[in-house]
């Protein structure tokens, strides 16, 4: 992570215009990653809810 940061600083010193475009792309990627992670969390929660329901149904059937 640290090495990547130094590398991007170095690139920024060389070519400011190219770096700004790249950083905008990085921001978009970060936003996308946030959305994806939220979706994954929601799916995991749904899956857990479904799993608990299934286990409850199974215990009811067993009883």
Image (cartoon, grey):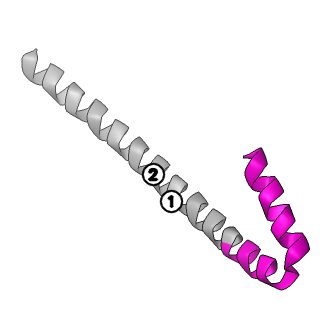
Relative to 50, is 32 above or below? below
Q: Which residue is mark 1?
A: 36
Left or right: residue 62 versus residue 30 is left
Task: Write the residue at 87% across / 80% down.
Answer: 16
Relative to 63, is 46 above or below? below
Neighbor class of circle 2 (other Cα within 10 Å; few <14, some 14-19, many 20+) is few
Relative to 42, is 13 above or below? below
Residue lying furthest bottom in this view? 17
What secondary structure is the stretch in magenta mostly built from?
helix
Q: Return the x and y of residue 9 as percentages of the image width and height.
A: 86, 63
The magenta span reads 1-25
Q: Return the x and y of residue 58 as percentages of the image width and height.
A: 14, 25
Q: Return the x and y of residue 2 as percentages of the image width and height.
A: 78, 46
Residue lying furthest top in this view? 63
Quadrant housing the C terminus: top left
Q: Return the x and y of residue 55 as percentages of the image width and height.
A: 22, 27
Proximity of marks 2 and 1: CB atoms separated by less than 8 Å: yes
Indicate yes or no whether the magenta region holds residue 13: yes
């Amino acid at each position: 992570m640290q090495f990547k940061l130094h590398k991007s600083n170095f690139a920024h010193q060389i070519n400011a215009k190219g770096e700004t475009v790249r950083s905008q792309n990085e921001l978009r990627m970060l936003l996308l990653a946030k959305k994806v992670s939220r979706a994954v969390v929601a799916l995991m929660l749904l899956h857990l809810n479904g799993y608990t329901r299934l286990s409850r149904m199974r215990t009811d059937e067993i009883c």
